[in-house]
Amino acid sequence: MTYYTDKEGNDQVIQFATAGWWTGDLHSLTSQQPSIYTTRALADSEMLLLPKVRMEELLERYPKFERYFRIMFQNSLVTHQNRIIEAFTATAEERYHNFQKKYPQLEQYVPLKYIASYLGITPEFLSKIRRKK
């Protein structure tokens, strides 16, 4: 998961990345500034660190990677835009059900406090929603 820690010390989950997905901080990559985000593995994982200079070399040497990353970034932007719209228009219960559809396996190993953070609700309210099943 990718998250930032707010002034009160609470982790605010921005994104979950399941098997085969990428996560990171595009702003940090492009600006070469330290990231405000942290990425944490919640299950056994492999992590690839791709510094900007190495990424640029990869893109120059293998143009197909440039297309791959462009498509990946486009898809990421669409996903984030849809998440923003959902945050403004869907109820907490609808957001939770959409989360379950998008990430059907995550509840098995992700602590509920992180799911609640991702949904923008408290863990207590998430528990109430889950009891309604």
Image (cartoon, rainbow, N blue to C red):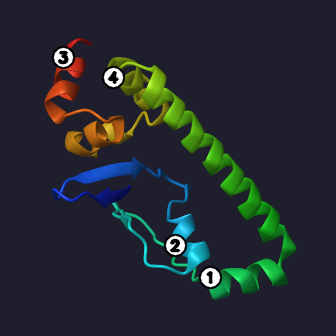
Relative height, residue 73 to residue 29 (above, below): above
Q: CA distance from mark 2 to mark 4?
A: 31 Å
- Work out which quarter of the rendered image holds the C terminus and state it: top left
Which callout, 3 or 1, points to the residue nearer the camera? Answer: 1
Identify residue for label 3: 131
Q: Are marks 1 and 2 in contact (CB under 8 Å)?
A: no
The answer to whether 123 appears left or right of 83 in the picture is left
Amino acid identity at mark 4? Ala
**Label 1: how many residues lie within 10 Å, few (<14), some (14-19) or many (20+)?**
some
Residue at 75% across / 54% down in the picture?
71
Residue drawn at x 42%, y 49% is 16
**Amino acid type, mark 3:** Arg
The x, y position of residue 98, in whole percent, is 45, 25
- Give amino acid for label 1: Lys
Residue 92 is labelled as 4
Q: Nearer the viewer, mark 1 or mark 2?
A: 2
**Label 2 with label 4: CB-CB less than 8 Å:** no
Q: Nearer the viewer, mark 4 or mark 3?
A: 4
Q: Residues within 10 Å of mark 2 (few under 14, many from 20)?
A: some
Residue 40 occupies quadrant: bottom left
- Residue beneath disc 1: 52
Q: Residue at x 86, y 73 (%)?
A: 63
Q: Secondary structure at mark 2?
A: helix
Q: Is residue 37 left or right of residue 28?
A: left
**Sequence-first disc among 3 and 2:** 2
The amino acid type, in three-letter code, at marker 2 is: Ser
Q: State the residue position of label 2.
A: 28
Q: Are marks 4 and 3 in contact (CB under 8 Å)?
A: no
Residue 106 locus on image (x, y percent): 36, 41
